[in-house]
Image: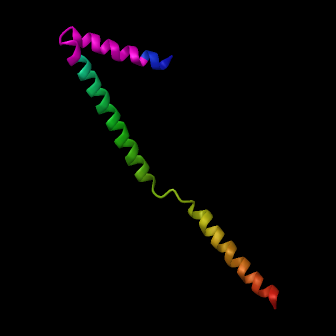
């Protein structure tokens, strides 16, 4: 239902602008505005992802290394 409402709004904008401009030009302006908004949102999202940093589980990696070291030490002591 929400998608239909949004489409209706865009159609209304085209119709409203077409009272002053040709219909194709009104549709072009609304389409260009949508592309501009989508581009801005995509760039903002990309920046937020880049600011998040590496998506590695750093604590888990460190814990696994410590566990491996512990196992090596205890395996050596068990062989004696």
Q: Is the magenta stretch mostly helix, strand or loop?
A: helix
Would you identify the image quadrant in which residue 21 lies?
A: top left
Q: Which residue is drawn at 71% across and 81% down?
A: 72
Q: Is residue 80 left or right of residue 13?
A: right
The answer to if 9 sits in the magenta stretch is yes
Would you identify the image quadrant in which residue 64 lies?
A: bottom right
Question: In the picture shown, does residue 72 fall above or below 39?
Answer: below
Question: In the picture shown, does residue 77 fall above or below 20?
Answer: below
Where residue 13 sits: x, y (%)? 30, 15
Q: Which residue is drawn at 69% across and 72% down?
A: 67
Residue lying at the far front of the rendered structure: 24
Q: Which residue is drawn at 33% across and 12% down?
A: 12
Q: Residue at x 28, y 22 (%)?
A: 30
Residue lying at the far left of the rendered structure: 21
Residue lying at the far top of the rendered structure: 19
Question: In the picture shown, does residue 43 fall above or below 1?
Answer: below
How does the figure colour the protein chain or chains? rainbow
Where residue 77 sits: x, y (%)? 78, 87
Residues in magenta, as a range: 6-25
Tag count: 0
Would you identify the image quadrant in which residue 37 lies?
A: top left
Residue lying at the far bottom of the rendered structure: 80
Q: Give the quadrant of the C terminus.
A: bottom right
Q: In this view, does 51 lie to the left or right of 26?
A: right
In front: 28, or 43? Answer: 28
The answer to if 71 sits in the magenta stretch is no
Where residue 8 sits: x, y (%)? 39, 13
């Amino acid at each position: 239902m929400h998608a239909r409402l949004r489409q209706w709004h865009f159609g209304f904008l085209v119709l409203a602008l077409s009272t002053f401009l040709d219909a194709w030009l009104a549709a072009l302006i609304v389409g260009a505005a949508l592309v501009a908004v989508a581009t801005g949102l995509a760039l903002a999202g990309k920046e937020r992802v880049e600011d998040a940093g590496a998506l590695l589980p750093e604590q888990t990696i460190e814990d696994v290394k410590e566990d491996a070291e512990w196992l090596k030490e205890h395996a050596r002591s068990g062989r004696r």
